[in-house]
Image: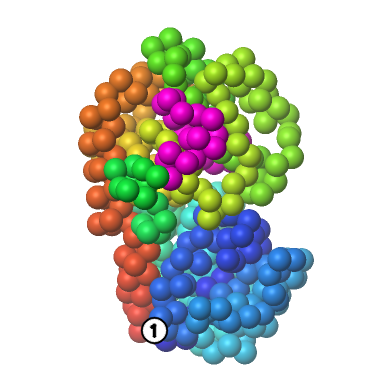
């Protein structure tokens, strides 16, 4: 099958600048290309060639400023059986006109069909143009079908995934070695490490975690909250909110460490050195990919009930889901529970790893995508 996968205008593929959608495209394309003809479209980047074929994937990178126009031109000549457009429903009708013989699969990674982002007329045209619609969580699927009930027959959830081979739990020999090296390198030997990975944005809630530090330190003075991330992917510039976080963190130098943007290829090392993972999202998160990463790394997960986050966490088995997501004391309570019980941490971490192996490896994602592609290709 001749397949086109289209990234957004934000970041390039491969995900050298980070980005959940870019990781999603790259990881699934690598497996699909073993048996299918796969072309990946994304924006140009100074560190990448404008066009190349690597690992069986043909990459075409276009100008950000004229991306949609150039995409339409490429698709009109490409004769793709299936075009997988990621998270840009507003482009779908235009691209479909450029390639009327192709079947379009739209994957929706955020709340793109709300009234603030799309009119009813545009939404109906988009749904009509799509052969299939994939969503990254049941929550995102509901944001579409509740407003557009007729889309229900096309909408299905395909959860994202994680490279199971790059995340090594601490109970493995390799994971234990990485954990030791990383802790020594960071000067964090003897610490209980609580990990946050994500953009330093108010909607991600890092300020809530910082407010929980006094209650955590009172019971576990050896606790260290490690923040990995910046205000935007690959951008370490400091805005007012990040400056506020640094100011709060400076009040607890023995309990808080900030590590700025980390290349995606290095992220697994930081999971390996940690004891538990916290996602403190305050917004209706579609379903953050950090959950898959933490489970693959064998870490218990504390997350919020916002959006789709709780869909992959089984309460009390591989983690905890916090309902009072804006209350620092709730995070402190769950963190203290885990820090005080190594057997519970181990049991939850192993459960999470098992779940990741059974449901969220990239092989499973690629298989699910091919099922959708075949269904789309058969539709008139």
Which residue, as the protein is rendered here, is positioned at the far top? 218
Which residue is identified by label 1?
35
Q: Secondary structure at mark 1?
A: loop
- Is residue 287 visible in the rendered image? The answer is no
Q: Residues within 10 Å of mark 1 (few under 14, many from 20)?
A: few
Name the residue at 23% across, 29% down: 343
Q: Nearer the viewer, residue 211 or 371?
A: 211
Q: Quadrant of the N terminus?
A: bottom left
Q: Quadrant of the C terminus?
A: bottom left
Magenta highlight range = 178-202
In percent of width and height, residue 253 lies at 59, 19
- The quadrant in which residue 210 appears is top right
- Is residue 253 visible in the rendered image? The answer is yes
Q: Is residue 102 toward the left or the right of residue 372 in the image?
A: right
- The quadrant in which residue 313 appears is top left
In this rendering, the answer to whether 224 lies above or below 304 is: above
> Does the magenta-highlighted stretch encompass residue 116?
no
Q: Nearer the viewer, residue 320 or 91?
A: 320
Name the residue at 32% across, 65% down: 364
Name the residue at 47% across, 46% down: 269
Q: Is residue 156 toward the left or the right of residue 13 in the image?
A: left
In percent of width and height, residue 109 lies at 49, 55
In percent of width and height, residue 79 lies at 54, 89
């Amino acid at each position: 099958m001749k397949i086109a996968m289209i990234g957004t205008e934000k970041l390039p593929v491969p995900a050298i600048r980070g980005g959940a959608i870019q990781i999603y495209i790259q990881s699934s394309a690598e497996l699909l290309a073993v048996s299918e003809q796969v072309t990946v479209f994304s924006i140009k980047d100074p560190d990448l060639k404008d066009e190349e074929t690597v690992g069986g994937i043909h990459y075409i990178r276009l100008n950000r400023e004229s991306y949609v126009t150039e995409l339409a031109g490429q698709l009109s000549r490409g004769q793709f059986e299936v075009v997988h457009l990621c998270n840009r429903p507003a482009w779908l009708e235009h691209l479909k006109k450029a390639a009327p013989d192709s079947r379009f699969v739209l994957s929706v990674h955020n709340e793109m069909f709300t009234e603030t982002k799309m009119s009813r007329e545009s939404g109906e045209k988009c749904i009509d143009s799509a052969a299939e619609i994939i969503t990254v969580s049941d929550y995102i699927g509901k944001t579409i079908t509740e407003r557009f009930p007729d889309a229900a027959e096309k909408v299905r959830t395909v959860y994202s995934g994680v490279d199971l081979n790059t995340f090594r739990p601490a109970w493995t020999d390799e994971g234990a070695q990485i954990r030791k090296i990383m802790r020594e390198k960071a000067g964090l030997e003897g610490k209980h490490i609580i990990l946050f990975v994500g953009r330093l944005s108010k909607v991600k809630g890092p300020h809530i975690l910082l407010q929980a530090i006094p209650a955590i330190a009172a019971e576990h003075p050896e606790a260290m909250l490690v923040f990995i991330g910046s205000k935007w992917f690959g951008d370490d510039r400091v805005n007012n909110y990040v400056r506020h976080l640094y100011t709060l963190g400076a009040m607890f130098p023995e309990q808080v460490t900030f590590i700025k943007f980390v290349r995606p290829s290095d992220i697994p090392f930081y999971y390996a050195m940690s004891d538990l993972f916290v996602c403190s999202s305050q917004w209706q998160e579609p379903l953050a990919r950090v959950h898959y990463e933490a489970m693959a790394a064998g870490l218990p997960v504390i997350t919020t009930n916002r959006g789709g986050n709780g869909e992959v966490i089984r309460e009390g088995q591989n983690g905890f889901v916090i309902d009072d997501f804006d209350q620092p004391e709730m995070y402190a309570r769950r963190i203290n529970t885990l820090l005080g019980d190594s057997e519970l941490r181990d049991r939850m971490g192993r459960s999470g790893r098992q779940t990741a192996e059974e449901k969220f490896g990239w092989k499973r994602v690629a298989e699910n995508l091919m099922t959708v592609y075949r269904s789309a290709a058969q539709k008139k």
